[in-house]
Amino acid sequence: MLLSLGMFVFQLQTIPYETLKRDSEYRWSGTARIGKAPARQFLGPGDEDLTIDGRLIPELTGGMEQLTKLREMAAKGKAWILTAGTGDVLGKYVITKVSDDQSHFLGNGVARRISFSIGLKRYENDDNRDLGQLMDSKP
């Protein structure tokens, strides 16, 4: 297992990603001062975004059905627990984007190569009512 998002597992047979990009923002407020640069005050952490990029080769890995499952999870409007393959719980995240680019088609229109990108944003609400459950539960 590489990662799990809720009950969805990123692994070689489903979605083996190639890159995992993490952006952490920190909020600073500036106060204008006469004749000087602005004074800064730390307001706390800001957004944390993850971008998972990779390529699927349906003959060897997962295919469009895995991306469809992720789109269904995103459409539920829920946050999901993200866990690394090491067992570290990375926190609660919402799916903000699922995109794909299909190429190398077979005669029946099935893509042999699917590049994908999945956008996640950290969910900091303390209320767990918006936390997703099993993938096949009703919204």
Image (spheres, rainbow, N blue to C red):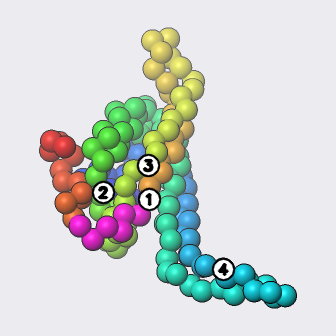
What number is the disc on residue 12? none
Residue name at image x 34 percent, y 45 percent? 74
Q: Which residue is mark 3?
A: 96
What number is the disc on residue 30? 4
Dots 1, 2 in contact, CB < 8 A: no
Which of these two is toward me, 13 or 121? 121
12 left or right, relative to 76: right
Dots 1, 3 in contact, CB < 8 A: yes
Binning the other alpha carbons within 10 Å of mark 4 as few (below 14), some (14 to 19) or many (20 upward) gives: few
Residue name at image x 49 percent, y 66 percent? 48
Which secondary structure class fits the magenta region best?
loop
Q: Position of residue 94 (x, y in %)?
A: 37, 55
Q: Element at badge 2?
A: strand
Residue 125 part of the magenta-drawn span: yes
Q: How many marks?
A: 4
Q: Which residue is mark 1?
A: 121
Q: Which residues are magenta?
A: 122-127
Viewer-nearest of labels 1 and 4? Answer: 4
Q: Which residue is mark 2?
A: 79
67 left or right, relative to 7: right
Circle 1: residue type: Lys
Q: Element at badge 4?
A: strand
Residue 51 part of the magenta-drawn span: no
Q: Quadrant of residue 92?
A: bottom left
As displayed, is residue 122 above or below residue 52? below
Indicate the quadrant containing the C terminus: top left, top right, bottom left or bottom right: top left
